[in-house]
């Protein structure tokens, strides 16, 4: 059974950092496209960053220069490093596989 389990969310002051993790089981992460999305109440879920099997990375404009996606192939985990956090980054962050399968999400709250 394929599962995606996010962790690492929490509360952080403006300007702080967090590292989110997506533990993938049941499939090899490096054979899939793994994406991070985020969602706030009343808004559509928006794409944040992604990493392909060969390791190509892409970022949405709000994430460029502040967030970094990476993959640990030994542990089958995809990380999303969040730096210089702003209150508008407050959201539930979701891991996704191939634009098809979702994790349960992890909450990030940035205090102003």
Image (cartoon, rainbow, N blue to C red):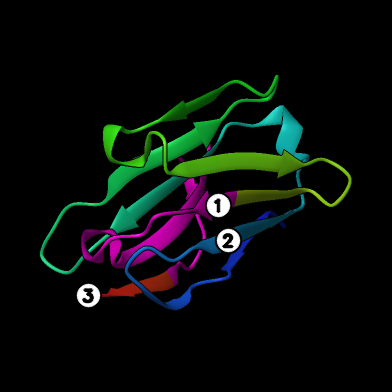
Give left or right: position of 100 versus 92: right
Sequence-first disc among 1 and 3: 1
Circles 2 and 1: CB distance less than 8 Å? yes
The residue most toward the right is 74
Name the residue: 49% across, 63% down. 17
Magenta stretch: residue 108 in it? no
Sequence-first disc among 2 and 1: 2
Circles 1 and 3: CB distance less than 8 Å? no
Q: Quadrant of the C terminus?
A: bottom left
Give left or right: position of 95 versus 75: left
Cα distance in 3D space between marks 2 and 1: 4 Å
Which mark lies nearer to you, 3 or 2?
3
Is residue 108 depicted above or below 46 in this figure?
A: below
Crowding at mark 3 (Cα within 10 Å: few <14, some 14-19, many 20+)? few
Cα distance in 3D space between marks 1 and 3: 20 Å
Give left or right: position of 20 versus 28: left
Q: Which residues are magenta?
A: 80-106
**Residue beneath label 3, please?**
112
Q: Nearer the viewer, residue 16 or 64?
A: 16
**Residue beneath label 1, please?**
81
**Residue beneath label 2, please?**
19
Sequence-first disc among 3 and 2: 2
């Amino acid at each position: 059974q394929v599962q995606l389990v996010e962790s690492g969310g929490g509360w952080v002051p403006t300007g702080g950092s967090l590292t989110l993790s997506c533990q993938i089981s049941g499939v090899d992460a490096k054979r899939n496209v793994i994406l991070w999305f985020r969602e706030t109440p009343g808004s559509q879920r928006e794409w944040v960053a992604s990493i392909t099997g060969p390791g190509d990375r892409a970022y949405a404009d709000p994430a460029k220069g502040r967030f970094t996606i990476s993959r640990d192939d030994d542990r089958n985990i995809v990380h999303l490093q969040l730096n210089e956090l702003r209150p508008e980054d407050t959201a539930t962050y979701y891991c996704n596989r191939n634009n098809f399968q979702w994790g349960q999400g992890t909450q990030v709250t940035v205090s102003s």
